[in-house]
Image (cartoon, rainbow, N blue to C red):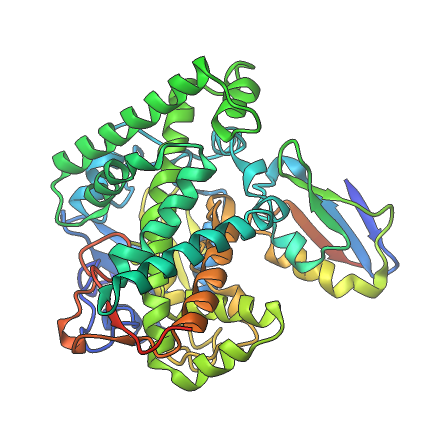
């Protein structure tokens, strides 16, 4: 799934790669959560506020299994 | 650069300098900046790439062209004991590649989410409070490893799995035999089998008498009965949780306590910290500074891979060292110094990287946060009760740490 981060960039989320490490939740708790059924990443906002783009970038950089990828536009 | 042109530079694992208990062996770090990739010889005559650099290690651990399978030719077996159980065919998901790894790991992922582990904090606090009460009742001096550092994580993992804590000595004994470098391959393999049998008994019982909201019962109903995993895979995964839930956190507690005692000014600042984020950052720095994962993460290249100015060829063994990554001066300023407010401490390499990153990291962090704040607040005059040269460090074990840490204290609070 792809999410626009304003005009700053685009976040791609691939749950099939997620290992539930929760690094994204620690980096950007307003954007990411882990679901109760599998403990895997989910984006909890309909759109990502570009004001917190840095946190989202940190979450993508910190993702150990490349389930999150950020591409600056 | 071809492999033939790279001479080996010693043996992996190399001995630590006994005078520097927090430092990795100098053989890996003396030229880390110029030489982040070392060609080293193993105990059995095999050679492997020892990856000392931070970025190089992270890159390799995240690369799907790198396999964690010990049954592949070229996989580096770094001690007879590790060879003993890794070659036995009894594999947990940390020795499998994707997609198999993710299928098996997902039996457990939902139990280790940040919010679920955070909900365990009050129970961890209860267990730590009780453990400090017991220490005070025993009176100083006392061995902090036996009476505090080991029982707390052991109780936590037994409770997490709803396993009877009366069995803790079985699990602790088999775990130690599996991981000690003094164990023969045969002893390690046999201990691994006994621990697996114990886990199999546990899940067999849970299959007949399921519990509500229980890790093993739900793994059976949601992953085994649905055909995604087998009972054997669940038993192997359970064994991994026991194994990883014991020695690691226990030794981190002992080494962190010693590190704080050795840095009294920073300890004072730590105890005055008002913001939980300061405590969390301090724990990250202690996990970096006193790294206990000394065996390295063993992998084998599935393809030719360029990294750190070197080509690792398909079929060559790779040992990614967390303890040296945590001392990489290109990533951490003055890496041999403890700075509890180090801005990038949370990027330490101690939990690994890639699909095999430690499943229990949040649990370990919370245990350390509660343990260290509680212990030093109640026993502020805690000190090591023997001369330093009497301390026995676990230099002969997959997990570094202390065999005993005799401590004493003044008046408790």
Residue drawn where x is 14% and y is 51% of the image? B43
Task: Let me know if residue B299 appears in the view.
Answer: no
B89 vs B127, nearest the viewer: B127
Q: Please indicate whether residue B23 sits to the left or right of residue B378 in the image.
A: left
Residue appearing at x 22%, y 69% in the figure: B141
Residue B85 quadrant: top left
- Which of the image's four quarters has the C terminus of chain B? bottom left
Closer-to-camera residue (B217/B341): B217
Task: Find residue B64 and report its horizontal and vertical position in percent.
Answer: 50, 42
Quadrant of the image containing the N terminus of chain B: bottom left
Q: Residue at x 48, y 52 (%)?
A: B126
Residue B157, image x, y percentages? 41, 42
| B232 is higher (above) or lower (below) than B352 | above
Specify the farthest residue to the bottom: B265
Q: Nearer the viewer, residue B149 or B79?
A: B149
Quadrant of the rendered structure where residue B311 is? Answer: bottom left
Please give the count of numbered marks on the rendered protein: 0
Q: Is residue B255 left or right of residue B341?
A: left
Q: Relative to B202, does residue B273 appear above or below in the rendering?
A: below
> Residue A1: percent from the left, percent from the top?
77, 40
Q: Position of residue B192 (x, y in %)?
A: 24, 33
Observer-nearest of B4 and B140:
B140
Whether residue B356 is visible here, answered yes or no, is yes
């Amino acid at each position: 799934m792809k999410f626009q981060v304003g005009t700053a960039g685009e976040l791609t989320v691939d749950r099939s790669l997620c290992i539930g490490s929760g690094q994204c939740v620690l980096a950007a708790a307003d954007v990411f959560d882990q679901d109760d059924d599998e403990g895997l990443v989910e984006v909890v906002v309909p759109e990502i506020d570009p004001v917190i783009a840095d946190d989202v970038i940190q979450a993508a950089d910190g993702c150990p299994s490349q389930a999150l990828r950020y591409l600056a536009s | 650069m071809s492999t033939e042109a790279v001479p080996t530079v010693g043996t992996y694992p190399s001995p630590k300098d006994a005078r520097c208990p927090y430092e990795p062996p100098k053989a890996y770090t003396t030229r880390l900046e110029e030489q982040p990739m070392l060609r080293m010889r193993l105990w059995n005559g095999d050679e492997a790439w020892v990856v000392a650099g931070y970025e190089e290690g992270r890159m390799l651990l995240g690369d799907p062209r790198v396999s964690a399978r010990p049954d592949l030719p070229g996989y580096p077996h770094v001690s007879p004991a590790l060879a003993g159980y890794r070659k036995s065919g009894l594999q947990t998901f940390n020795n499998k590649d994707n997609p198999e790894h993710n299928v098996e790991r997902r039996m457990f992922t939902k139990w280790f989410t940040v919010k679920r582990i955070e909900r365990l904090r009050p129970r961890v606090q209860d267990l730590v409070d009780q453990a400090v009460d017991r220490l005070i009742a025993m009176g100083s001096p006392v061995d902090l490893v036996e009476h505090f550092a080991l029982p707390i994580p052991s109780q936590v993992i037994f409770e997490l799995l709803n396993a009877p804590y009366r069995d803790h000595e079985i699990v602790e004994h088999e775990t130690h035999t599996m991981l000690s470098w003094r164990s023969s391959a045969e002893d390690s393999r046999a201990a691994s089998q006994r621990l697996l049998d114990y886990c199999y008994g546990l899940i067999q019982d849970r299959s007949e008498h399921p519990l509500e909201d229980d890790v093993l019962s739900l793994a059976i109903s949601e992953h085994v009965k649905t055909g995604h995993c087998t009972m054997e895979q669940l038993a192997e995964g359970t064994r991994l949780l026991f194994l990883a839930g014991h020695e690691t956190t226990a030794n981190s507690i002992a080494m962190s306590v010693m590190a704080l005692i050795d840095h009294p000014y920073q300890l004072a600042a730590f105890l005055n910290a008002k913001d939980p984020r300061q405590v969390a950052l301090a724990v990250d720095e202690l996990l970096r500074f006193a790294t206990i994962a000394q065996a390295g993460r063993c992998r084998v290249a599935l393809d030719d891979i360029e990294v750190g100015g070197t080509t690792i060829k398909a079929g060559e063994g790779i040992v990614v060292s967390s303890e040296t990554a945590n001392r990489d001066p290109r990533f951490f300023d003055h890496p041999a110094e403890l700075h509890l407010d180090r801005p990038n401490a949370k990027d330490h390499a101690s939990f690994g990287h890639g699909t095999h990153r430690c499943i229990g990291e949040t649990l370990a962090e919370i245990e350390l946060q509660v343990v260290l704040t509680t212990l030093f607040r109640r026993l502020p005059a805690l000190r090591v009760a023997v001369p330093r040269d009497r301390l026995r460090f676990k230099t002969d074990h997959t997990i570094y740490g202390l065999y005993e840490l005799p401590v004493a204290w003044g008046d408790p609070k």
